[in-house]
Image (cartoon, rainbow, N blue to C red):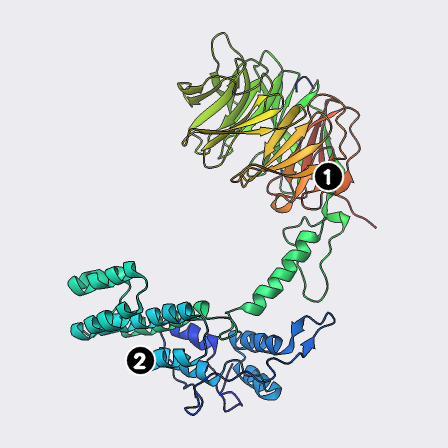
């Protein structure tokens, strides 16, 4: 290339089910009573708690915690009888009697009693006790206002809430409700009975988040742990590349090589010279390629992954170095090598506009995220921005871009990324007017921006690929080796499911840095690769052998 259920639980020790909390949040009222022993308001140590009983082969799972989390999950799933039976049989209660009483008092609106019980639960952190008391008394304040008991509400605010000496800003907001009752709705009060019950259950949810998990187990804790385990297995699977892959709890997760596209499905031979660049559209329905033969081609991708020629785009007087899809995929920019940029209608193949700059050549092109402006690198090392009618809107002069250069813009439109020197990449923040620079020791041949704008993939002349985190402070995350840059520019890209794979001439797993597949087939240098953003099982490669290859899944016997 040229250029760089359920009835009452069996146990008499009834517990508040999270399912009941959920029904409360839907507007119904609590009909069952939670029984708490009045002779034991202090939270006793849970049976077996403190024992060194463990389960599991590693000896790291405490039996008491394990049983309590299972009981919590059963309640959440609606299996109240089963959960109560588990508590009874194991002798391990989900909550202490004091906690059960506290939760019932909240739902019944017994505010003073609930605050008293809170102090008897045995919390060591006084700040948590104060914060929880504040939430409870705030609810008491609002319900007094709802009943038009203004003086009682004022007394609660002055003698109880303010007495806690925390959250003064919130106290001022509550004071405004006394002066102007119409503000109560915006601050957090409602005078409907069903809304009041919703509010109480919501309060209980907030208290559950505030109190230590040893006192009240967080909602959906078991689900969270299982999801975390599955996620770790998936992330460790270097071949994971399927959107519909079902992960089972019965076995450890592992994908095979058959999830990685490595078989040539089609060879596209419509170009008459080296193919320098190609890119799938955002919707994955089209592929555009550009060539040294001074043309670009729009290819159509059918539902089965088959690719066919849609339009040949002619009009450039020099090799076409790059293409760029509009955000809605309705238009395509093509950039002639130090020549002009042409904008094409994807549906008809008609040239809509030619963008140029007198006496200068354009070397790169791209779209702003809203699709209203385009930008380009110029061979005088500046970067210019135009509206769609060709009016120049802004130009950044100086050492902004190289003669042959990739050019990217983040999806929020704030940062323009370009090569400013052979060994440096400039990140220019348009709004904050701040510039940051990535410095490399080797010549940079190309770079690619991840979809989430967090990472930059940089190709170097010494056949290394560097992964930079550009979200916040600049940080070199990984170095990859294994691809062979025979000559000129090789453009690598992110790809696969959630862009977990990196593609050059070989495929590399982004996290493990392992080379997982090499793709032989082209007889010339591979200049550019592109992964279909909507189908992780399809990718394309462009080569000096004048062909574009479409790659799909291989079936291993």
Along the viewing direction, whichever of 128 and 348 lies nearer the viewer: 128
The disc label shown at residue 112, or none: 2
The disc label shown at residue 522, or none: none
Image point 24% across, 63% down: which residue?
174
Along the viewing direction, whichever of 172 and 342 lies nearer the viewer: 172
Residue 265: where, in percent of width, then height? 74, 37
Residue 111: image quadrant is bottom left
Q: In front: mark 1 or mark 2?
A: 2
Return the residue at label 1: 507
Image point 16% across, 61% down: which residue?
180
Quick one: SS at disc 1?
strand
Q: Is residue 62 above or below residue 509?
A: below
Q: Judge left or right: residue 316 versus residue 14.
A: right
Along the viewing direction, whichever of 283 and 78 lies nearer the viewer: 78
Image point 66% across, 34% down: which residue?
466
Residue 399: where, in percent of width, then height? 52, 18
Q: Is residue 505 above or below residue 76?
A: above
Image point 53% across, 68% down: which residue?
220
């Amino acid at each position: 290339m040229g250029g760089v259920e359920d009835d009452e639980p069996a146990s008499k020790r009834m517990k508040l089910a999270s399912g009941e909390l959920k029904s409360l949040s839907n507007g119904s009222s609590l009909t069952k009573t939670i029984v708490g022993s009045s002779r034991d308001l202090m939270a006793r140590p849970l049976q077996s708690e403190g024992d060194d009983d463990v389960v599991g082969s590693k000896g790291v799972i405490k039996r008491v915690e394990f049983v309590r989390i299972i009981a919590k999950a059963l309640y959440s799933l609606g299996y109240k009888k089963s959960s109560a039976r588990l508590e009874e049989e194991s002798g391990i209660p989900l909550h202490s009697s004091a906690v059960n009483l506290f939760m019932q008092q909240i739902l019944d609106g017994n505010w003073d009693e609930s605050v008293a019980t809170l102090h008897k639960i045995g919390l060591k952190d006084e700040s948590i006790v104060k914060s929880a008391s504040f939430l409870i008394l705030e609810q008491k304040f609002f319900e007094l206002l709802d009943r038009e008991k203004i003086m009682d509400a004022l007394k609660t605010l002055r003698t109880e809430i303010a007495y806690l000496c925390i959250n003064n800003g919130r106290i001022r907001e509550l004071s405004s409700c006394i002066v102007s009752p119409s503000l109560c709705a915006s601050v957090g009060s409602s005078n409907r009975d069903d809304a009041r019950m919703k509010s109480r259950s919501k309060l209980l949810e907030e208290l559950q988040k505030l109190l230590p998990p040893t006192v009240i187990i967080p909602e959906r804790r078991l689900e969270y742990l299982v999801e975390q385990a599955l996620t770790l297995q998936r992330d460790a699977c270097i071949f994971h590349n399927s959107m519909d892959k079902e992960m089972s709890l019965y076995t450890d997760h592992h994908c095979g090589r058959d999830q990685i596209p490595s078989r040539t499905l089609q060879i596209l031979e419509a170009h008459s010279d080296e193919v320098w660049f190609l890119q799938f559209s955002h919707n994955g329905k089209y592929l555009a390629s550009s060539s040294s033969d001074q043309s670009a081609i729009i290819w159509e991708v059918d539902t089965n992954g088959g690719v066919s020629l849609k339009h040949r785009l002619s009009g450039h007087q020099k090799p076409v170095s790059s293409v760029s899809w509009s955000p809605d995929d309705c238009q395509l920019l093509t950039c002639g090598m130090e020549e002009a940029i042409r904008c094409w209608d994807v549906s008809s193949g008609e040239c809509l506009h030619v963008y140029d700059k007198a006496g200068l050549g354009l070397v790169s092109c791209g779209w702003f995220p809203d699709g209203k402006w385009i930008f380009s690198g110029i061979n005088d090392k500046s970067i210019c921005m135009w509206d769609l009618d060709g009016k120049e809107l802004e130009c950044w002069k100086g050492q902004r871009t190289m003669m042959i250069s990739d050019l990217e813009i983040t999806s929020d439109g704030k940062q323009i990324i370009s090569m400013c020197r052979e060994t440096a990449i400039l990140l220019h923040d348009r709004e904050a007017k701040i510039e940051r620079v990535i410095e490399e020791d080797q010549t940079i041949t190309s770079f690619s921006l991840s979809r989430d704008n967090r990472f930059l993939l940089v190709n170097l002349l010494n056949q290394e690929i560097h992964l930079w985190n550009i979200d916040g402070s600049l940080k070199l995350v990984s170095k990859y080796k294994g691809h062979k840059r025979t000559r000129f520019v090789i453009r690598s890209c992110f790809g696969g499911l959630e862009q977990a794979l990196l593609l050059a001439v070989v495929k590399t797993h982004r996290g493990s840095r392992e080379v997982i597949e090499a793709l032989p087939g082209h007889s010339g240098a591979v200049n550019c690769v592109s992964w279909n953003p909507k189908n992780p099982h399809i990718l394309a490669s462009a080569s000096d052998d004048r062909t574009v290859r479409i790659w799909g899944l291989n079936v291993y016997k």
